[in-house]
Amino acid sequence: MKTIWRLLKLVWPYKKWILLSVVLGTITVGSGIGLMMTSAFIISAAALHPSVADLQVAIVGVRFFGISRGVFRYLERLVSHETTFRLLTRFRVWFYRRLEPLVPARTLYMKSADLLQRIIADIQTLENFYVRVISPPAVALAVGVLMFLLLGAYHVKYAVLFLIFFALSATIIPFLSLQLSRGLGKKIVRLQSELHMAVLDDLRGLPELLVNNRLPDQAAKIERLNRDLNRLQKKMHIIEALNQNFVTLLMFGAVVSILLAAIPAVSQGALKGVYLAVLVMGVMAAFEAVLPLPAAAQFMEANISAGRRLFDIVREKPAVIDAAQAQELPSVPLSLAFENVTFTYPKNERPALRNISFRIPAGAKIAVVGPSGAGKSSLAQLLLRLYDFEKGKILLNGRDIRQFKQESIRERVAFVSQKFHLFTGTIGENLRLVNPRLSDQALLDLLRLVELHADDLQSDSPLDYWIGEHGNRLSGGQAQRLAIAQALCKPASLLVFDEITANLDPQTEQRVLHNLFERYRTHTIINITHRLIGMEKYDRILVFREGILAEEGSHQTLMQQGTVYRHMVAVQQEQNML
């Protein structure tokens, strides 16, 4: 029930649209009732051969209700679809806005396919929340009241008999439908999620599956999931067909009951005979309003399940929240200091960083080295405020990093991760995604800075070069250099590189780093790397091991006094000689 209330709260801003749709739906059904009753009156009265003048009002009524039913049905569909699309837009934007602050700390252990399923399929399931869950009961209630008053004008017992069968159709049948389909909605949502994840994994890992001859196994898994999903959906459709039959049965029960009550009145002269057909046809037309109700109950569980899956994500609190008085980070050269910083990733017991302390003056060029898992990348994660730390302080220009807005920090810190993402499109589109205000000449200068020339791309127009999906038309080195250029589009004061030269040959690596050092002389640069090449160019080297800062100093100092760094250099030299 809590999920239903939360969903209703989300749709509340569109209450006027929903109300308009319900009103139009009620008028549409009401026009159908008027059309059937006036038509029945004309046919019954015409059998008595009256004057045409006596039928004029009814004839006009048939024309009016016939035309109005079509017009109002069109308007009802138009408004209901517009309302549905607006609600879907609201759901998607709401979910994305709530999801964005959770990345990456709260989504670290979630599957991307599962998130995609929630964003697309679960929200798409909620399309039925308005069309099948909210609107039909409201229309049915309005039509029931309208028909009760209309039949009550003939005799109250007709209205009571109608209300009994109408209420049974509106409550008992949906209840039975809910019981028969209990668990099916959840299973369908779960199987849809599993099927989408399996298909996405298959597409992403298609080359590996082909190479290892495992494609038939994956295809069999997808076929099994699809077969199970089809079986459940078939059950759902069978229940839906039974629902319609039961509603029809109750409708005929209402018709027979009213006839049994009205025929004696006709015999006694209390009711004109022509009105028997009028009553019957009006009752039959009114049951159109309750036909969607069993489906509403049937889809209720799927809507609740989809809504719960969304709320399970967004109820998480962001790992990093701006302080109430957070300020903008000024656009000046930045100094950086860590003071006894300890940090542990979510669901981990062992700290990634333990009591880390160091200072980097503005404009310094720093290398951060160490084996895998030593905590080097965690420095960048904390600096970008993607995670929060348990204790200690991080200072930017002598002020606590928590005093600045997250967006402001990410605007002033250019970060290139070892796991970067390139969007499907051209090189120019990927660069302008970061900073659309840069001119073509400025973008070409950045490409030359990272040694990504027209000759490398075999294109006379590098900015218009189509890189394919996720940059699959680029080599690993070209993609990495484009990621560097993309980060440099920002008006940053601090540059943080995490293994940016892993896919570059030593000569290209040296040229790129030389260009960066020359271009950004006044900027603070932190280069996280495994490759101990050109270390003498850095002002200082931070050596990490098992989450602690083991050594720090210049290349010459560490080669003379250090042990961890000197050992790393020796091992790498031996590997290069092999």
Image: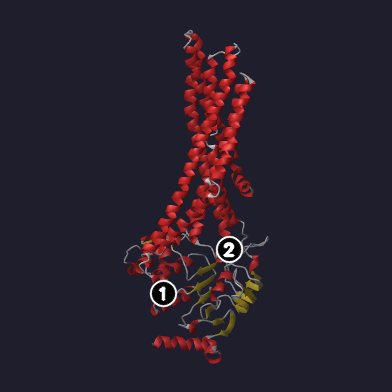
Q: On the image, numbered disc 1 is attached to which residue?
A: 503
Pick the front one: 89 or 283: 283
Cα–Cα span, label 2 and label 1: 30 Å
- Density class for disc 2 (Cα within 10 Å; few <14, some 14-19, many ≥20) is some
457 displayed left or right of 82: left
Q: Position of residue 43 (x, y in %)?
A: 47, 16
Q: Secondary structure at mark 1?
A: loop
The amino acid sitting under disc 2 is Arg
Give the residue at x 49% y 19%.
Answer: 40
Front label number (2 vs 1) = 2
Numbered label attached to residue 106: 2
> In the rendered image of this protein, does residue 447 appear above or below residue 39?
below
Give the residue at x 61% y 43%.
Answer: 12
Q: Position of residue 240 (x, y in %)?
A: 49, 40
Can you tell which quarter of the image residue 346 is in?
bottom right
Q: Position of residue 187 (x, y in %)?
A: 52, 52
> In the rendered image of this protein, does residue 59 appear above or below residue 159?
above
Pick the front one: 338 or 343: 343
| Quadrant housing the C terminus | bottom left
The amino acid sitting under disc 1 is Asn
Residue 529 shows in the view:
yes
> In the rendered image of this protein, does residue 108 appear above or below residue 18?
below
> In the rendered image of this protein, does residue 502 appear above or below residue 30?
below
Numbered label attached to residue 14: none
**Nearest to N terminus: mark 2 or mark 1:** 2
Circle count: 2
Give the residue at x 51% y 58%.
Answer: 115
- Density class for disc 1 (Cα within 10 Å; few <14, some 14-19, many ≥20) is some
Q: Secondary structure at mark 2?
A: loop
Q: Position of residue 178 (x, y in %)?
A: 56, 43
